[in-house]
Image: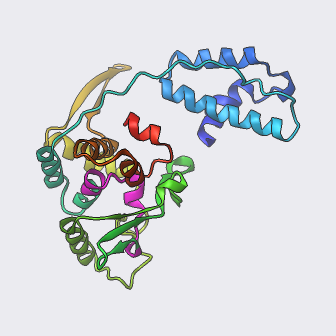
Amino acid sequence: DETIIRVHLVPALGDRPLGSIVPADITRLVKQWSQPLAHRTVRRNFGTLRAILNYAVANDYIARSPARNITLSRPQPLERPIIDSGAVLRLVNAIGRDHAPVVLLGAVLGLRWGECAGLRVRNLDFLGGTIAVDEQITRGIAGRAEVGPPKSDAGKRTMAIPPPLMELLSAHLARRGLTAADHDALVFSDRAGGPMSYSNFRERHWNPACVVSGVGEWKDERANSRTRRRYIGLTFHDLRRLNATALVAEGVDIKTTQRRLGHSDIRTTLEV
């Protein structure tokens, strides 16, 4: 939200009195965004602007929101790769033992990357064979890693975890010298013991491992007379899509799938 306000809203509307903004201004701004930006980015920008204007209405700064009756184009469905178990195992081997459990938590349990990074020792119940999700790592201002609650109340959940994966997590904690007494320690951390950075994880570990395992590739792009290497391929969130697809394919009912994925709206689960 802070980035959207600073980059997209303040330059366009920052010096305007709230009462002077009319629906035509919002429509014009949405059209300007639609030229260079993706559909989902436009929708996020508009959602932040609408929230600000709704707040202004609720506090009687303006009588009606100028963001009413604005039509946004529908985003095109994302075509994402669905990989099989063999590709998952190749990725696990390529990424190394320190990050292999993160990959499996995404593929086997459908955890978001931030939920994996936010796990603490106390979230692992080795006797009961469950894992609890109650925190996640998010990117704050200037990309700093911050600890916060899941995206919604539905994101707080406790799930059964397969014994082989629990054994892998137990071995991971042992290598780090952690025991049950270190209940607030992060299961996965940076070298200083703090929260992992998603950008570092992606650039240093995920992208190279995906290329090695055949689920991603490097593409050279020319820009301003310079060649830049860009990664194209599987993303961590694709593991979550894989998990949702596998649950439905195995005949798990959609309500259970929704609960395991931590979706607050079942329509989100159906879309995945």
Residue ID at (40%, 75%): 122
Residue 40, position in %: x, y? 49, 28
Vertical placement of 147 versus 200: above or below? below
Question: Residue 10 appears at what percent x and percent y?
Answer: 70, 31
Q: Is residue 59 left or right of residue 240?
A: right
Examine the structure image and report whether residue 119 is included in the region drawn in magenta.
yes
Quadrant of the frame with the C terminus: top left
Q: Which color scheme is applied?
A: rainbow
Report x, y in % for residue 180.
35, 82
Above or below, 101 relative to 90: below
Q: How many marks?
A: 0
Residue 75 located within the stretch drawn in magenta = no
Is 212 positioned to the left or the right of 99 in the image?
left
Query: 176 and 183: which one is in front?
Result: 183
Specify whether residue 145 is in view: no
Quadrant hosting residue 186: bottom left
Work out whether residue 50 or residue 242 is closer to the camera in this orientation and state it: 242
Prevailing SS of the magenta stretch: helix
Q: Where residue 47 sits in the image (x, y, percent)?
A: 62, 33
Quarter of the image with the N terminus in it: top right
Magenta stretch? 104-122
Q: Is 75 rendered above or below residue 261?
A: above
